Amino acid sequence: MKKYMANVHMSRITMVLLPAILFMMVMMGWGFGLLTNIEEEPYISEEDNLIVVGVSQLGSESGWRTANTESVQKAFTKQNGYFLIFNNARQKQENQIKAIRNFIAQRVDYIVLAPVVESGWETVLQEAKDAGIPVIMMDRSVDVADQSLYTALVGTDSVEEGRKAGRWLEEYLAKKGKSDEDINIVVLKGTEGASAQIGRTVGFSVVAGEHDNWNILEQEYADFTIYKGKEVMSEFLEKYDDIDVVVSQNDDMTFGAIEAIRESGKTVGVNGEITIISFDAVHDALEMVAEGTINVDIECNPHQGEYISDVIRLLESGQEVEKRYYVEEDIFTMENVTQDIINGRDY
């Protein structure tokens, strides 16, 4: 349906003649397309029958997020009938709001949003709704009173991921004969306000609440990054000398936490002093699962682009879509992770 106007490359001679050229083009009705700022509001033509999709990605904070972005870029190609306008918000909600408003101004057909936090979206989503542009949530959800402000969510069930971590710990302690022992737990949480952080916290807390002997010593935000994961874990180790379990809400924080634990002189994993529960199941983390450094990794599947494309195709054909679509996910331990699984990871 629509696409960007191609970039205009000019020789030195053309630059000299630019004022005259611009005047002629304005007189002929073409000037608007040339004068538009391509980064902010590119001119979109009707030449090709392409579905224009504006994607606001929250950032590139991890290998998982990079894979999530790549799945979108692979799904929304011209060969597949799409024209993709992509924006990296660099972990700032204000950048995402600006991007969405630019998408609206560019008259895209669909907006895909991976929100950095859950709250604060009502106004801009209402603007998209008023413009008649369906909004599809990717990976994370938003907290809005009016659920009609977005069409569908394609992502992961973060609450269920948290529950899976809790149920695994139940079974693990039972096998070790430690079901009745006091278990001291610290939790490295992700970005404050992010739905993945909220969901995983809630899911694990529900299971932990069923066990009076599970003591959650402290929970702290570590922003889903290696650096912050190490920093927060170092603080935990200074405060507590009796940590039994670390629940880290993504692999990047886990990498930092393990580094901090080892530097403190303690050991981790299957044969270590501290049990490690992680989330995402990226390639490097699965290597550590296979060698017994990470006890369990709850998968969070980043390959969501194709699912979103399927939703858009349904909408294009006038069909009803469900409000939520969850991607398939697994649980990996030393017992079931294989080299084929590890080698097959592209993130």
Image: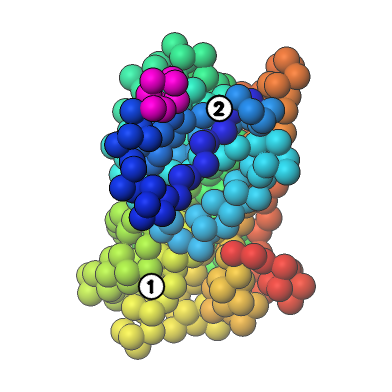
Inspect the image, locate mark 1, and give the three-letter code of the amino acid beneath it. Answer: Gly
Residue 72 image position (x, y, % from top left): 60, 46
Which stretch appears magenta?
24-32
Any part of residue 237 in sight? yes
Magenta segment includes 257: no
Q: In the figure, residue 314 lies in which quadrant?
A: top right
Asked whether disc 2 touches disc 1, contact meaning CB atoms under 8 Å apart, the reply is: no
Quadrant where the image shows the C terminus: bottom right
In the image, is 268 to the left or to the right of 97? Answer: right
Residue 260 x/y as whole percent: 34, 78
Q: Which residue is mark 1?
A: 256
* Front: mark 2 or 1: 2
**Which residue is found at the position 64% from the left and 65% from the top?**
346
Residue closer to the observer: 176 or 76: 76
Furthest toward the bottom, the residue is 265
How packed mark 2 is, by other alpha carbons closer than 10 Å (few <14, some 14-19, many 20 or more), is few
Q: Residue at x 33, y 34 (%)?
A: 20
Q: Is residue 143 above or below residue 162?
A: above
Query: Would you place residue 282 above or below residue 1 in this image?
Result: below
Residue type, numbered disc 2: Ser
Q: For mark 2, what is the residue?
A: 45
224 w.r.t. 2: above or below: below
User: Which numbered disc, 2 or 1, marks the residue that appears first in the sequence?
Assistant: 2
